[in-house]
Image (tube, grey):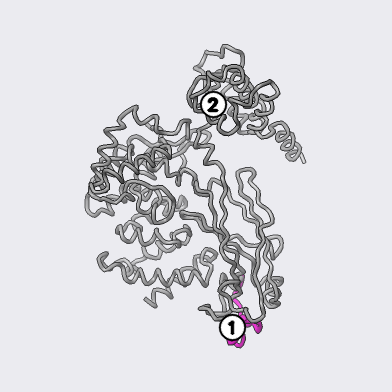
Amino acid sequence: MEEKVYALKPSFIMELHEEWKSDFSSLSNSEFIKHINQKYKGDKLLPHVLPGDNGLYIDDDVAFRINNLSKVGTEANWDLDASKLLFEGCGNGFGIFQKDENGKRIPLDMIYATDTRVWNYLSLFRLHSYTKNRWGESKDSKRLFINTLSNEKVTRHPIMRLYWTAKLCYDPLRNDSLELLPVLWKTNDFMTQVTERQQANMREQTQWFLDFCKDPKNSKILNEKSSDGYKKYRTLLKLYLAQDQIYVMANTNKKHFLSIIDDLLKAC
Amino acid sequence: MAIFNNPYPILSNSKGNFNDIGAEFNCTIFNVEFSENNYKIELRAEVINESVLNEMLIKGEIVFAVLVDCKPFYRKVFKSNVSPDAVTIEIDYRDISSEFAFELTPKLITEIDLTYKNENADYPMCDYEFNLSASQKLAEHDKIEFVFDRAYKLFDAGPLITISRLPKGKTPQNGTMDIKLDDPFNIIVSVSYKDYDIIKETNKVNQKLLSTSLSMNVIYHALSAIKDEPDNFSGLDWAEALDKRYGVFDKLQSAVDVLKITDEILKSPLIDLYNYTINKSD
């Protein structure tokens, strides 16, 4: 079964943000989520969503499962499970989706995948239990709202990050189309490091890089403890970004790209 | 003489190594279009007062390329194809984020591995030879920011007209379609179960035909109703949206006004359809 995904009116998102700033900024996010879900329960939310059919759906089983996930192992495992569910679904096709002309589920196009009105609806209302469980103790509004688009903001939004990490790793030509997702979600810190900088804009190269990290002989990049701040990875990234000023990395082929990364790793 | 931290001479108007001879790398956007779901942006590059790069460009050792960035998670290189100094960027709007903003960075980049020496570069770079791999930049222009205002607004208000399918066996009371104007969000057009499939097929084959044949009639009908009884429509989202943009509550005084604003809303649909048909048959 599926249900419609709404888009919140921009004026309503602003109103909620103002309310958070004035009454909830010193409280934990869970207080705010509880408050708004009580206040706009059932039909009371409808005047605040955009009219018209936007053609977006979420599998209701997926929504139920994401809302009821809990921490097993690390927080990154939790996010990985939620990310897989949201993108891949749980057996009936994509978890959040549009439909093609034959009614088949297809991934969101870029407009919807970046429409902050939709993602705010999901984080604050439809998937609010996940947001509350996962980020309820936080007092950071980035863990509730997204107002403008940037890699850094997408990477920090509770729901958009789940979708986008899967979208970045998604390769329908692989046997497991999300094969690289567990590599990216090795830890939360690693995921953030990879996705928040501009090099993540090169989706193909990001997948090559994750392939590189997946190879056991290169695992030293990932073997440091997160608390050490991934020194090697950070150094590698700095060198990588510097190389992007010399090479137009988005124009390189896989072989050339991997030889550049190999050379950079030797210098770390 | 200004030497920036470039590993070999780069022609750039702000951080370059060709200041002594006054060389420049300039770009012009000479065409921007939006059609058939595509953004099309055409740029032309011009190297002024620098013969070495110009010659390399003609020989195809370097190419004019434009790096396109769009937040979040989009970066792509478009290279010259027809002429070495021109790049055509074509992007399906569904591949671009809802902000519809691009950053374009024009560059000249190496197409092959080569040895590069340029006696026109500032001293001391002019004296050295550099081994370069493919995809290294030899010239760079400042970023050009580009913002389109498209599609977001359409979704913002929802579709103006919604086609609704009647249950099997039921037919519209008023012939081919019933037009409901009292819904707060959209104009709702109800058609029979069978006709709905025909409309869907027509939409697939030719959206412009549908826009002309169906939307034109529906909007004409709706605007006529607003002209006659504007008070009946105040407070309805779809009518308010039309009023905000086209002033329908005040401007509609006669049948001619109705025709004129229908034409404005649908952007001359008949001529558009004729042009489309002529181009398609060429």
* Residue B80 drawn at (x, y percent): 66, 62
Give the residues in magenta.
B111-127
The alpha-carbon separation of the residues under discs 2 and 1 comes to 64 Å
Front in this rendered view, residue A196 or B169: A196
Q: Tell me the quarter of the picture where residue B210 sits.
A: top right
In the rendered image, the vertical position of residue B10 relative to residue B90, given as above or below: below
SS for dot 1? loop
- Identified by mark 2, the residue type is Ala
Looking at marks 2 and 1 on the same chain, the residue that comes earlier in the sequence is marked by 1
Q: Quadrant of the C terminus of chain A?
A: bottom left
Q: Please give the label number shown on residue B1.
A: 1
SS for dot 2? helix
* Residue B110 drawn at (x, y percent): 60, 72
Front in this rendered view, residue B106 or B243: B243
Residue B126 within the segment the image draws in magenta: yes
Q: Quadrant of the N terminus of chain A?
A: top left
Q: Are marks 2 and 1 on the same chain?
A: yes
The residue that appears at 44% across and 51% down in the rendered structure is A149
In the rendered image, the vertical position of residue B64 relative to residue A264, given as above or below: above
Q: Is residue B245 left or right of residue A28?
A: right
What is the residue that sits farthest to the top in this orientation? B173
Chain letter of mark 2 equals: B
- Identified by mark 1, the residue type is Met
Residue A148 within the segment the image draws in magenta: no
The residue that appears at 43% across and 40% down in the rendered structure is A10
Residue annotated with mark 2: B239
* Residue A145 drawn at (x, y percent): 35, 46
In the rendered image, the vertical position of residue A235 relative to residue B273, given as above or below: below
What is the residue that sits farthest to the front in this orientation? B250
* Residue B52 drawn at (x, y percent): 68, 78
The residue that appears at 25% across and 38% down in the rendered structure is A34
Instruction: Sort mark 1 into few (<14), some (14-19) or many (20+) by Cα contacts within 10 Å.
Output: few
